[in-house]
Amino acid sequence: MAALARWCVSHRLVAVLLWLLALGGVSAAAAFAGSAYSNNYDVPGTESGRATELLKDGFPGLSGDSNTVVWHTGDGTVNAAAVQQTMTRTLDEVAQLPGVASVVSPYHADGAGQISRDGHTAYATVTFEQPARSVDKAEARAVVDTAKAAQSDGLRVELGGTAVGLTEAAGGHIAEAVGVAVAAVVLFLAFGSLAASLLPIATALVGVGTAYAGIVLLGHLMTVADFAPMLGMLIGLGVGIDYALFIVTRHRRGLKRGLSVAEAAQNAVATTGRAVAFAGATVCIALLGMLILRLSFLNGVAIAASLTVVLTVAASVTLLPALLAYIGPRALSRRERRRLAEHGPQPELPTGLAARWSAFVEKRPKLLGVLALIVIAVLALPTLSLRLGTSDQGNNPTSSTTRQAYDLLAEGFGPGVNGPLTLVGEVHGAEDKLALDRLPETLRATEGVAAVTPVTYDKSGEIGFLTVVPGSAPQSHATSELVDKLRDDVLPRAESGSSLEAYVGGITASYDDFAEVIVGKLPLFVGVVIGLGCLLLLLAFRSIGIPLKAAAMNVAAVAAAFGVVVAIFQWGWGSELLGLGRAGPIEPFLPVIMVSVLFGLSMDYQVFLVSRMYEEWLETGDNRRAVRVGLAETSRVINSAAVIMISVFLAFVLSGDRVIAMFGIALAAAVALDAFVLRTLLVPALMHMLGGANWWLPRRLDRWLPRISIEPPECRTARLPGQRTGRGDEGDKDDDGLVSAERVPR
């Protein structure tokens, strides 16, 4: 790491140009290739997956995305001559638009049943030539504009569907801009130097920008969800600015000690850069743990997010030192430079609120520990009612046309019309066909079914499907119960006496199957991620207690963060006020991604906090002093980093995307709890109570384990003359005055 730092400082122009070339080249390639994202929830081997495969085989023409144009009259009916003439002309215009395959009007025979019983609401089905992921946004916008042009005082027109939803995506990068602006303010307040405060942001933006373009290209090689780039940007900006913050803080301390600009930059990367690389590795390990689930949908998310973390770490240890060399002593504020010139180098000792808080925790560890546990437990309670499912356009903000179309359809035709089930059967003979033809009659008599269409067969007559409209909304428990009832009771009875195999597909069925697979694999996933994280901490800190406490804290942070998410998104506490739409279930993939991300981010603060305590423990053998000094010297920078990360995460609520907003709030809540409750309160309180047991490791295991050294980001500078060093005097000090863990005799 030291050699890398020296090269980047010595060849700073080359380092900067290489990064700019990488950013420009990958961005140009991404712009040329275009995006190819896919939200494919189908899981091979599930019943809904089999239904989808049969539909694709028998009815390839159904692959185009289907959307709806809904119109409603308050006075009169949709059959009035003026309304019928206006909408017929409008639908004819829509049918001629580029990318539109067909339009089924309720005023034609094919659209029978598309007018509500009260005659006030009707809808037409607009099918695009391509699936939603391939529909050009301009083509979807043309459909929306053409249909909306028919709207008048007595006629309300709204549109729904996945392709139409593309036109409602938040434009620009408002969320990122707000997050970066808040981070810049926090950095300026922390450093007092405009140049120093801009460097972490510049470094993070270059790394994240390169990764964002790389994710676009990745979408052409594997399944990558459409929210993966935004998720990667959310994580990358948070950790990228934080990692650069730690390195710049160490660089500034080097300058205050009297080191030259080059020496300070090299020393910062050689010491803090190692901790940053270790922390980034833990985040990547946690994210790549999703690969063990063997779900293509999550594989793309894991690799995309990991790519972002890798590039932000790389930018922090290569681009940042080059930029630090460029700004020179301006990394310090004018006051700091003047003080350094007048009084010379002086050691920095922990003072102020950080020192007082550390002493306060030392005096009352039991009381504060109990209070922290109560806070975490209360916030985690809503997690017990967690219900996994997938939000749809009924959860969109009330101002969106997709939400209004959803509500109009629900009011006019019943809630189930927004999420019909598809039953697909494979026919092998006359008995199978007879059984499938009788199925609609059986389904109409089934409780919870509102409507059933006749069976439609493919050209060969070997595959048939019918649509079942539930009497309940797609996200309700009743619809999920209907899916189970059809699979476990209704279909087996209907298939008896034949070789017919019918499968239940559709929105609710596929989401339920996806959630079931996720939940089934979640224990293995959590065990692997926590196990690998504990192993890394065991190697780094030579202790049994530290990894176990870290695992417990991470689980607590995840539980509390999920409690906040459930309260806001599932219970609806403030979701409409925040512009996040109607309450609904939690996305089924959220637990997996959140466990990965939160575990990785929690490990960052654990490394930065405990590594300083570990160094003091090695030097003095005094646990109380180690915990007190470690907390006093790291809490300020950890809290500053947490404020930045929270600001970045919360800014993504402005993205207009419910899934991204869910991630943003969950991550912000977890980081806030982790930094301000767990790491600066509960962890030191427990470590004070456990005493020397914190650092216990069986001798045999100690000899067997390989030794690694993490230089903490907040190591103390050279001690004052005559200051007590304790047992650390036995070890060798490096050229920075720090005790290296691997050289201390044990």
Image (cartoon, grey):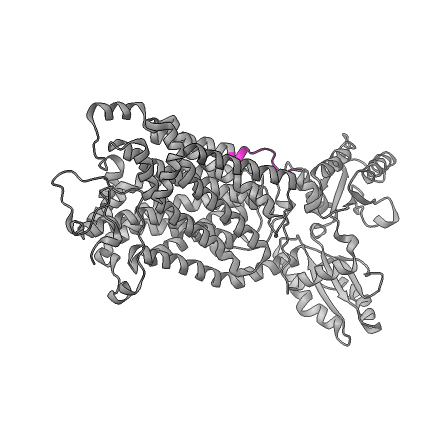
Report the front residue among 76 and 220. Answer: 220
User: Which stretch is magenta?
Assistant: 168-176
Q: Which residue is drawn at 57% across and 43% down?
A: 658
Kindly give the residue lying farthest to the bottom in the view shown.
497
533 above or below 277?
A: below
Q: Residue at x 52, y 63 (%)?
A: 521
Magenta stretch: dominant secondary structure: loop
- Residue 534 is one of the magenta-drawn residues: no
Report the front residue among 240 and 502. Answer: 240
- Residue 169 is one of the magenta-drawn residues: yes
Which quadrant is home to the N terminus?
top left
Q: Percent x, y for residue 385?
A: 50, 55
Q: In which quarter of the image is residue 123?
A: top right
Q: Which residue is drawn at 77% across and 34% down?
A: 146
Q: Percent x, y for residue 681?
A: 30, 47
Left or right of residue 145: residue 326: left
Q: Percent x, y for residue 311?
A: 47, 43
Report the front residue among 215 and 108. Answer: 215
Left or right of residue 679: residue 491: right
Left or right of residue 505: residue 380: left
The answer to whether residue 64 shows anywhere in this view is yes
Q: Percent x, y for residue 343?
A: 19, 25
Kindly give the residue lying farthest to the left in the view shown.
722
